[in-house]
């Protein structure tokens, strides 16, 4: 990732901080079709929830041995064009890409010392922490907003237990995002 960001910086003449943002936007754009497909699969799954729940309960009660119920679930998936594995494709594909960004950008100034002066405004040194805390707070709030928007709320047709689980999931992920804010404060500006 560092080499790719450096290539954007060198070929375009953009400052380091803009090259990082441009390459991040490009990576997001490339991964967008996968994200949209995952959202589409999730919407389809929600639409068949009423038909799927009794079959899932039968499979679970049998300890996975009810082959007839499992076959019915598979037929239901095929009928509506749902593939549960596609819903997890986005996180699985994003993980190595953005871990590479994270790990690479943490050592940006080690690999490219000129990046020490590649920032702007109040974050001139991309290897230093943002002592104003503007970047970590902005990063944390944007992550929190993303969680609040992307994690689904309870929908009609959900049982009370499923609705409670959906609310709990949203709250837990929001809490984890807020708890990660102190960690973000220790990151170099290049990462944020």
Image (tube, rainbow, N blue to C red):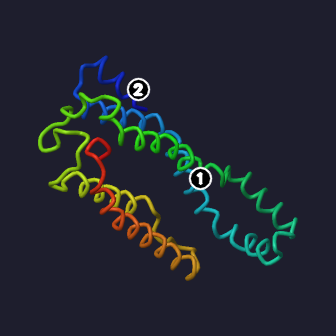
Q: Quadrant of the N terminus?
A: top left
188 on left or right of 63: left
* Residue 167 shows in the view: yes
Q: Position of residue 26 (x, y in %)?
A: 39, 32
In primary-sequence order, the first of circles 2 and 1 is: 2
Residue found 24% across the figure and 54% down from its top: 138
137 on left or right of 65: left
Instruction: Give whichever of 63, 156 is nearer the camera.
Output: 63
* Residue 32 shows in the view: no
Number of marks in the rendered image = 2
Observer-side mark, 2 or 1, equals 2
Q: Secondary structure at mark 2?
A: helix
Q: Check residue 3 in the rendering and tell me which mark sits there, or answer none.
A: 2
Give the farthest residue toward the bottom. Answer: 160
Residue found 68% across the figure and 49% down from its top: 81
Q: Which residue is mark 1?
A: 87
Distance, label 2 to label 1, CA atoms, is 31 Å
Label 2 crowding class (10 Å Cα cut-off): few <14, some 14-19, many 20+?
A: few
Q: Position of residue 101 (x, y in %)?
A: 41, 40
Residue found 56% across the figure and 56% down from its top: 42
Label 1 crowding class (10 Å Cα cut-off): few <14, some 14-19, many 20+?
A: many
Instruction: Give whichever of 22, 182 is nearer the camera.
Output: 182
């Amino acid at each position: 990732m560092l080499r790719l960001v450096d290539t954007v910086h060198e070929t375009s003449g953009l400052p380091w901080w803009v090259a990082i943002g441009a390459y991040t936007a490009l990576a997001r754009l490339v991964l967008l079709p996968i994200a949209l497909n995952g959202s589409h699969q999730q919407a389809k799954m929600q639409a068949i929830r009423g038909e799927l729940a009794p079959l899932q309960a039968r499979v679970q009660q049998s300890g996975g041995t009810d082959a007839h119920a499992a076959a019915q679930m598979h037929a239901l998936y095929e009928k509506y064009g749902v593939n549960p594995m596609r819903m997890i494709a986005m996180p699985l594909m994003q993980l190595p890409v953005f871990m590479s960004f994270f790990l690479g950008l943490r050592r940006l100034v080690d690999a490219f010392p000129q990046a020490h002066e590649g920032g702007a405004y109040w974050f001139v040194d991309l290897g230093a922490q943002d002592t104003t805390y503007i970047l970590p707070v902005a990063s944390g709030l944007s992550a929190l907003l993303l969680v609040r928007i992307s994690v689904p709320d309870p929908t009609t047709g959900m049982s009370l237990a499923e609705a409670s689980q959906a609310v709990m999931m949203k709250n837990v992920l929001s809490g984890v995002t807020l708890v990660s804010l102190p960690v973000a404060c220790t990151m170099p500006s290049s990462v944020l």
